[in-house]
Image: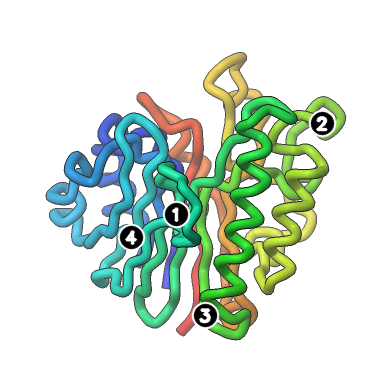
Amino acid sequence: MRIATWNVNSVRARQQRLVNWLKSAQPDVLCLQELKCTDADFPFDAVKEAGYFAAVHGQKTYNGVAIVAKQEPTDVVRGLSDGVDDTHARFIAATVGGIRVVSAYAPNGQQVDSDAYVYKLEWYRRLKRYLESRHKPDEPLVMGGDWNIAPEPIDVYDPAQWEGQTLFTLRERDVLQQVCTWGLTDAFRHLHPTEQKFSWWDYRMLAFPKNRGVRIDHLFLTAPLVPRLTACDVDREERKGQQPSDHAPVWLELRD
């Protein structure tokens, strides 16, 4: 079973790239982020023609997440459902092939100590409470998304330059680690403990050709799925070409 995650940075602007990647990569499940469209504007027909169903939690202009799968997603939950007045479409969960799948688009945080940064930290605390109240670590669960946090120094191209900047502050890394202590394993780092690969590169300053990137797109697994994990990688090639997203897809494979 192949499960992937990809921040497409506007599904309408990148519709043909999405369809082409679905046809070539053939993931069983794809978690999408930053759709930047409402549910009504999502390209359901194009995705269906490629052989996929879609569960969508969209938002006009900003945010938006989806789970695209060869089997129709069931038991769909949109949002963290915790009673907090939050209009951001950042979270969707569904069951596919006996596995609970989450697609999440974590807040960016903007500037350190800004309202957006405080919201980001609290969003992660809400996510942990969601896991604690709705799931158990011994259930098969995959959480894919743009988490907007690089967990370790190896996950940024220049740790000294990035230290203290949003995406790599100690408070952000700690709150992500607190979520993981609930019972999640970073699939890529589990298989590649010392390898440096990135999933996001700025459009500016030739960041991609110079490989000045960060690894902020992650696939997390619960314990029952870790023994089934056989591969996890970044599809760097998809960051190339005309009008790419600034993120590359990340994928994993689970044996039956």
Residue type at mark 1?
A: Phe
Residue at numbered disc 4 = 26
Q: Residues within 10 Å of mark 2 (few under 14, many from 20)?
A: some
Where, quadrant-wise, is the N terminus in this rendering?
A: bottom left
* Of the image marks 1 and 3, the number of the one nearer the N terminus: 1
Closer to the eye: label 4 or 1: 1
Direction from residue 181 to residue 239 in the image, left or right: left
* Of the image marks 2 and 4, the number of the one nearer the N terminus: 4
Residue at numbered disc 3 = 140
* Of the image marks 4 and 1, the number of the one nearer the N terminus: 4
Residue at numbered disc 1 = 91
- Residue 54 screen position, x and y as percent: 25, 58
Residue at numbered disc 2 = 164
How far is disc 2 from disc 4 in space, using C-alphas?
38 Å
Q: Residues within 10 Å of mark 4 (few under 14, many from 20)?
A: some
Residue type at mark 4?
A: Gln
SS assignment at label 2: loop
Direction from residue 228 to residue 159 in the image, left or right: right
Closer to the eye: label 2 or 4: 2
How far is disc 2 from disc 3 in space, using C-alphas?
35 Å
Where, quadrant-wise, is the C terminus in this rendering?
A: bottom left
Q: Nearer the viewer, residue 95 or 185?
A: 95
How far is disc 2 from disc 1 in space, using C-alphas?
27 Å
SS assignment at label 3: loop
Residue type at mark 3?
A: Pro
Residue type at mark 2?
A: Gly
